[in-house]
Image (spheres, rainbow, N blue to C red):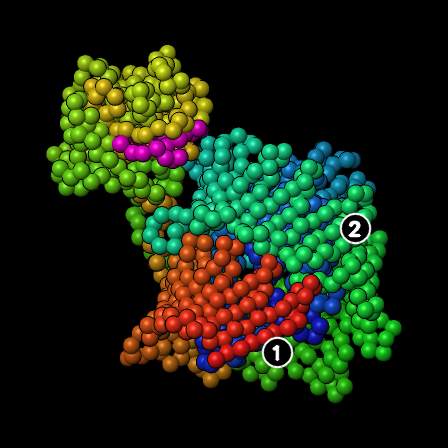
Amino acid sequence: MYGFSACSTAAEGGSLYVAQHNGFYPVDGYIYYHTLLSANEVTGLISGTYYSVWPATGVAGYPPVPWFHQLTACDSARPVEVEPLTQSAGNGNSCQRPPDGFKTPNPIIPATGEKILDHEDYAGQGPAALSFTRNYRSGRLLGAMTGPAKAGLGRTWSHNHAIRLSQDGTAGSVGSTARVFLGNGSVRAFHWEVATSSWVPDNSVDTLAANASGLLYKRLDDDSSWQFDSAGKLLTVTQRNGWTITYSYSSASTPISIAPAAGLLIGVSNQFGRTLQFTYNATGQLTSVTAPGSQTTLYGYDGTAETSRLTTVSYPATTGSGTVSKSYLYENTTYPQLLTGIIDEKGNRLATYAYDSQGRAVSSQLAQGVERYSVSYPASTGGATTVTDPLGTTRSYNYGIAQGKLAVTGADKPSGAGNSSAASRVQDANGFVTQETDFLGVNTMYTWDINRRLPLSTTKAVGLPEAQTSATQWHTTYRLPVLVTEAGRTTAYTYDNAGNTLSQTVTDTASGTSRSAGWTYNPQGLLATETDPSSVVVRSYAYYSAGNFTPTQPQGSFDPSIQLVSLLLHGDGTNGSTVIADSSPRPKPVTVVGGASIGSTQSKFGGSSLFFDGVDASNTSLTLADSPEFHFPGAYTVELWVRPSSFKAINTWLFGQILQTGLAPVRIDIAPSTGLVNVLGSSDNTSWLFTTGFTSTAALQIGNWSHVALADDGTTARLFINGVLQATRATWLKADSATALRIGGGYASGDREFDGYMDDIRVTKGIARYTANFTPPAQAFPHVGPAATDPNEIGHMAGDLQSITNAAGHVTQFTQYDRTGRVRQMVDPKGVVTDMVYTPRGWTSSVTVTPPGGTARTTTYTYDNAGQLTGATLPDGTSLGYSYDAAHRLTGVTDAKGNTITYTLDNAGNKTGEQVKDPSGNLQRNITRVYDALNRVQQITGASN
């Protein structure tokens, strides 16, 4: 079966390696893993995608992890080199958990008082997989990082692709500085050294140099190269193996529906053809990110000013075509930009954060007060910071900083969360931890390559009979080990020019016996073969050379701003019907009043339209209830096709936000008898502001279709008839009142009803679609987004794995993928076909296994809006249900027969109680667990009938 994403670690030779498992599949009695090694903020990779096959044994179908053949520059026996929170924490050593005291879960950084938070909105699959992760850092408002993040997400949020380079001073002169701002808040700083005519790093071993394209930044942590243009925009990121991520930006010719100005990031693409697309509103706020497969995430704010805050993030619903939203709260009146809480997609408060009078984070907790961590800061510099965990245990920590590197230098208790613990650490003048003493008084010593900032040796139990030393020699160019020497054995590695591992040789130093494994790669940098110690190719891999997805939409039949559409009425239906459908992404009910209906006598598109009989006494109109999507504090566009049957001697209502008085913040109507179009408004809801209204110079014609558009870009409103600009008004009224929406009639006296037909009425919030003359649309407005292919479309992209062949010649095929890179179908060597289907957010919804000539067997999965697994139905009809508390912790399991398992959790999330009951409610098993203050199990009591 297909497995859910999980993160595993494996130890080999004293070194710790980490990979992200995107899925596992059965292959000849083995488990095939598609692994992504992590370190780079942009791609999530150290050096690409690798494939491993392990024996299919292990608990609950998860195999043991004997080794990973791609190594990272870290060692399990040494502490992580961490940098201050004003600079990069991604240093190529991310495979080990940070020292205890460095950060709390749901993180607060006790050393600085900063609250940080990462939310992943999209995680792609396949080689060089793309991702989109937002990160919140309170330090962007207070502290060394003060200043706008310039990501279009407000002052305290950014994302992993919001990367830029800035220079201060005249390039090449004394005092010139350059800084590389990464999306996670990290900064790499350089200064110009006149003596060498070069950029010199201030806080890293990275390099920066001018070239023909601008400035090339080389990050030695992971051997990646970052090309910036002369204006500081990131153009490409190239990994050591040659895989490249490309960034594209808006220009003066970019449609305003995508970006309001030049220089905004609008696309991120990998070399295998997968792309992220970005759109912005009129003030440059990020409004949507569309991933491969048209999975679109929407972003909402509490205004359009620079101080406006990100308040909602909307994702595709688990089922259907709607969306579900996660909300962010800012309840601190002293620091209104600081995040204080999260409302999950189910509408429940999930998290609460608090700050002191200086803006330092003092507590973080989940719903119902669980998993609460609180921080108390010292009264004076150099004192200990105290952290209280969910069990009420307090721990005090001391910190040191040298060369911009932060270290936890002391603690009074061991970790309760499994992090690396030490009673004391010694940090040298270069920022390296050179000695660590545990709580038994046992010392560990570390040596470093100071120039390359790489660990050279680790000696455990210094001065004791059991002392052991491991040493690492490093590649002369890459941050990759070439020889690891430890007690009883050595491990040697070789690499190609791209840094891909070619061989691993493990030698028993006592006997001199060696065992080697080898790997080769294709021209794309993808794993081609695996060779075992007997030099036999045990596995070979083939990949698709090009994509074969076929678009399901004709060119031009999509709207790049579809997610900003608040209302879309096509007028489709049978003659006389009073059922009017809203085709916008978030449909709203339409109420038909009086003599309004679907009419087939006239239509602009589709054979029918919206008919209004113009009878005043019946208040003929269409109405929609008040909605935030009809409040327009900034840019918006209202457009519709109109075919009048007659003109009245009084203004005739086309479109407006109706108040009980009959007034409207904004109203579009037809002037008495002339057919001219008026735009009027009321700012005080007591009188019309005729002096600020405006009127078309061209008139509508009885019996003819005309396109009418009102486009307001936030500063200027423009009226168009048939694509020709008629009039403009600067500083036009903002249609931001809580009102109902009415089309075709609206005055309380019922004497301004429209007589005629309308078709394709579209309201767009957040952009002015038109700022100059244009050609009116020649077809009905689309109700799908850009390249919005069928989300269930199958095919493959270049670089997707096509097959695995083992030493016996047995072939496992991967025949279908979706656009995001998830496997949709595979065929094993015996011809058994496995089909996978996913929800709009990428969760596995069903797995169907069909043997040759046999009956398909399907397992289905259901989820709630927050992504929690709520049910599973097995092929035999057996079902399981899962329940959770408000903190998203599993609290119960129920099967179809009524058997139940109930979990009792303490504030730290430990299972302190476990009850199993039969369908009659009789207790079958009762297990209790007792944990001490250090979160260690002290007692387990179990009983069963």
Instruction: Specify the amino acid type for callout 2.
Output: Ala
Check residue 629 for magenta coloring: yes
Front residue of 342/166: it is 342
Check residue 940 for magenta coloring: no
**Quadrant of the rendering where the N terminus is positioned:** bottom left
- Crowding at label 2, few (<14), some or many (≥20) Cα neighbours within 10 Å? many
Secondary structure of the residue carrying tag 1 is strand
In the rendered structure, the answer to whether residue 900 lies left or right of residue 753 reads: right
Q: CA distance from mark 1 to mark 2?
A: 49 Å
Location of residue 930 by image quarter: bottom right
Residue 336, labelled with which disc?
A: none
Task: Determine the residue located farthest toward the right in the rendered image.
Answer: 463
Front residue of 655/819: it is 655
Answer above or below: position of 493 versus 196: below
Residue 517, labelled with which disc?
A: 1
Residue 34 in percent (x, y) is at 51, 68
In the rendered structure, the answer to whether residue 176 lies left or right of residue 316 reads: right
Q: Name the residue: 37% across, 11% down.
A: 691
In the rendered structure, the answer to whether residue 668 lies left or right of residue 381 reads: left
Residue 481 in percent (x, y) is at 70, 68
State which tag comes first along the sequence, 1 or 2. 2
User: What residue is shown with label 2?
Assistant: 384
Task: Determine the residue located farthest toward the bottom in the rendered image.
Answer: 511
Location of residue 423 by image quarter: bottom right
Please report the bounds of the magenta region as a residue range.
623-643
Secondary structure of the residue carrying tag 2 is loop
Answer above or below: position of 623 versus 883: above
